[in-house]
Image (cartoon, grey):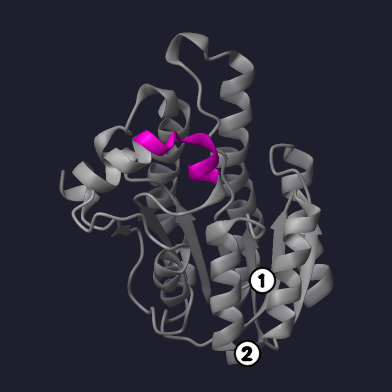
Amino acid sequence: MTSQTHSSGGAERVAIITGAGGGLGSAVARLLAEAGDYRLSLVDNRREALEGTVADVRGLGAEAEAIVVDLGAADEAESVVPKTIERFGRVDALVNAAAILHRRQFDEITPQDFDTVFHINTRAPLLLARAAMPDMASRGWGRIVNVTSTGVYEGGFTMTSALYEASKGAVAVLTKMLSRHGAADGVLVNTVCPGGMRTGMLLNETSPELVAKAEREMIPLHRLADPAEVGQIVVWLVSHLNTYATGAEFDITGGLALH
């Protein structure tokens, strides 16, 4: 058993960020690059968007590698950690930011819809954590951050997001179980729970009328978050400054979770 205050070695640390071509994942990548603490393994299925994030990160002076995979395919998800270790020799942090919203009317949800959402939003974080934790444990230091949703508490804005919110509820429970599993080995596992963020995932799948209603009536700060505002807490959670938080849910919702 290793003390959780043990340092993994400053800038030699390696972080995997999934969904790195999207709003939150790319924001976390840039923030970590600016902090200078990590070499980055950046994961997405959208090559062009991912390459844009890699270019930004390298422009900030960080070493970064692009891994283009479909996290909905189990074999591809399971390849991420081995590819990262092959490239960088280790993995110290995992940020599971990849997700899909995939709105459907409740009576139109198909088994394929269920599989698509749960394979990316729930199964992929499980497979990546399972692959990464032994390497983290070998050095007695690791950090995992899973991303959920305020819908875990209040059920989402409409039934069209039922699959998304259910998949995130499963991730919330998984996080608590992983935190117990990893604690003795110095692996801290936490959840960041955003409200609405100005990301393509939300804005492309949500009507402007619903966004405006949320800002006007549901969010006390009366605006969606910039992804970097949520990314800041992710960066803290994977840093050496976090020595004791594990199994926790960090709400970054502009007060939405008060409702």
Residue drawn at 66 percent across, 55 percent down: 131
Between 173 and 184, the one lying in front of the other is 173
Q: Residue 83's quadrant in the figure?
A: bottom right
Q: Residue 166's quadrant in the figure?
A: top left
Dot 1 crowding, Cα within 10 Å, few <14, some 14–19, many 20+: many
Dot 2: element: helix
Q: Is residue 204 magenta?
A: yes
Q: Which residue is mark 2?
A: 11
Dot 2 crowding, Cα within 10 Å, few <14, some 14–19, many 20+: few
Instruction: Give the position of the C terminus as an image quadrant.
Output: top left
Q: Decide if residue 1 is on the left or right side of residue 149.
A: right
Q: Residue 150's quadrant in the figure?
A: top left
Residue 56: x and y in percent read: 70, 76
Q: Which residue is mark 1?
A: 91
Instruction: Work out which residue is located at the far top of the displayed protein and give it.
Output: 107
Q: Is residue 86 magenta?
A: no
Residue 250: x and y in percent read: 31, 60
Dot 1: element: loop
Q: Decide if residue 259 is on the left or right side of residue 139.
A: left
Magenta stretch, main secondary structure, is: helix
Range covered by the magenta-colored residues: 201-209
Residue type at numbered disc 2: Ala
